[in-house]
Image: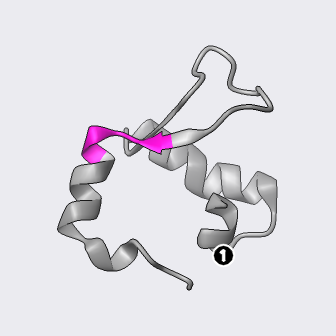
């Protein structure tokens, strides 16, 4: 779902260019941080990510 919303089709490129940078700056977090490669791994916005989204709601429905 995140890849599609970001307009990405390559998983490796998506991880390197989108997931990793957003994790590093604290905008998103893993739901299972002790098992980053789990098939059940999901991501959620952090408090900082939610605050940023509230300040810039136009980015919420991108690529639809």
How far across and down, in percent of the image, does residue 55 sit?
A: 18, 66
The chosen color scheme is one colour
Q: Is residue 19 above or below residue 26?
A: below
Residue interval drawn in magenta: 44-48
Which residue occupies the foreground of this view, 18 or 50? 50
Which quarter of the figure has residue 35? top right
Q: Farthest residue to the top: give it.
A: 34
Q: Is residue 6 above or below residue 31?
A: below
In the image, is 49 to the left or to the right of 35?
Answer: left
How far across and down, in percent of the image, does residue 56 sit?
A: 24, 71
Q: Which residue is mark 1?
A: 7
At 76% from the left and 27% from the top, the residue drawn is 37
At 45% from the left and 37% from the top, the residue drawn is 24
> Where the N terminus falls, by quadrant?
bottom right
Q: How many marks?
A: 1
How far across and down, in percent of the image, does residue 2 sit?
A: 62, 60
Which quarter of the figure has residue 54? bottom left
Callout 1: 10 Å neighbours few (<14), some, many (20+)?
few
At 55% from the left and 29% from the top, the residue drawn is 31
In the image, is 35 to the left or to the right of 43?
Answer: right
Helix, strand or loop at label 1? It is: loop
In the image, is 50 to the left or to the right of 7?
Answer: left
> Where the C terminus falls, by quadrant?
bottom right
Q: Is residue 38 above or below residue 57?
A: above
Which residue occupies the foreground of this view, 28 or 22? 28
How far across and down, in percent of the image, does residue 39 sit?
A: 80, 32
Residue 9 lies in magenta, yes or no?
A: no
At 32% from the left and 49% from the top, the residue drawn is 49
Residue 46 lies in magenta, yes or no?
A: yes
In the image, is 33 to the left or to the right of 52?
Answer: right
């Amino acid at each position: 779902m995140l890849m599609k919303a970001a307009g990405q089709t390559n998983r490796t490129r998506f991880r390197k260019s989108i997931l990793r940078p957003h994790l590093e700056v604290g905008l998103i977090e893993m739901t299972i941080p002790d098992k980053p490669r789990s098939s059940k791994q999901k991501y959620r916005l952090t408090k900082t990510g939610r605050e940023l989204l509230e300040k810039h709601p136009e980015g919420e429905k991108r690529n639809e």
